[in-house]
Image: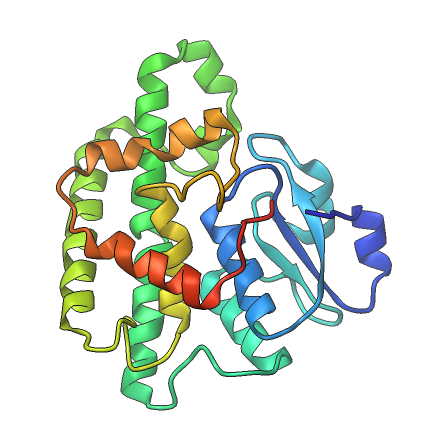
Amino acid sequence: MDYVSIKAAQASAGLALVVNAGVPGPWSESAKALFRHHQIPFLAVPQIPAAANDALVEWTGHRNAPIAVYPGEAPMTRALELLQLAERLGSGPSLLPQARSSRIQVTGWIQEIAGEAGFGWCARHLIFETWARQMNPEVRAANPMFSAYGYDERRQESMLEGAQSFLRDLAEALKASPTGYLIGDQLTAADLYWAYFSNLLAPLPDAVNPMQASSRSAYEIPGQLLVGYDPILLAHRDFIFQAHLQQPLDF
């Protein structure tokens, strides 16, 4: 992906989007897809995973990606904030249904996928737990990601159970849908978010997701622990990518 400096982004009159550089972080990949879907150009600014990113903090007040910076507005980081910004600025089909009851379902699923204590958080905790067992305590203490994301070894069982129950509920919802989409009969942001976050269950093949071997092995950890999940979860991901999303991933 082509990145620009913070200085160049600050001088721009358009949207700047801070995203993970070098890894297909699902929060960042989902954010990029929201703006691409709505045909909103953006300048990509790199966030370096596991680094201090002090310049980002000075500019935006945030250390982790994604961060959307739009002139005249406060930086935005949360999934639903980014979705609303894309809906407001962009064109093309909405990723939110018109019916309020369906919109509630979409935003609820996004929270369960990408929000605090959602699937992404649980899967990331499972990765950290595996790393923690392999790391020297001093090395782990020096890695800012453990503290930044609230790693606590006492939460391992609850995170595992949370991810398992989420996958069961999502599979049931997909089986109940006659259209192939999670809600309704067209693409919504909930489909988009699951397509990218499913990489924390089973990474897309290298032809679509050309990630480094070390990153791939990390992303494979949750799926190794969450055995027995329903194949419809990945079938839905593959359908959404084939029908709607840019390939290969570019990070």
Q: Position of residue 160 (x, y in %)?
A: 20, 39
Q: Residue furthest bottom?
A: 99
The vertical placement of 65 against 210, above or below, is below
| Viewport quadrant of the C terminus | top right
For the residue pair 125 and 40, the one nearer the viewer reads as 40
Q: Position of residue 141 (x, y in %)?
A: 46, 18
Q: Is residue 115 visible?
A: no
Q: At 66% across and 65% down in the image, what residue appears?
A: 74
For the residue pair 95 and 12, the one nearer the viewer reads as 95
The vertical placement of 186 against 215, above or below, is below
Q: Is residue 71 visible?
A: yes
The vertical placement of 171 against 100, above or below, is above
The vertical placement of 187 against 9, above or below, is below
Q: At 51% across and 43% down in the image, what residue appears?
A: 24
Q: At 61% across and 82% down in the image, what residue appears?
A: 91
Is 179 on the left-hand or right-hand side of 124?
left
Q: Position of residue 86 (x, y in %)?
A: 57, 73
Check the image and tell me how it is coloured.
rainbow
Q: Position of residue 164 (x, y in %)?
A: 17, 46
For the residue pair 128 and 92, the one nearer the viewer reads as 92
Q: At 61% across and 55% down in the image, what residue appears?
A: 67
Is 130 on the left-hand or right-hand side of 188?
left
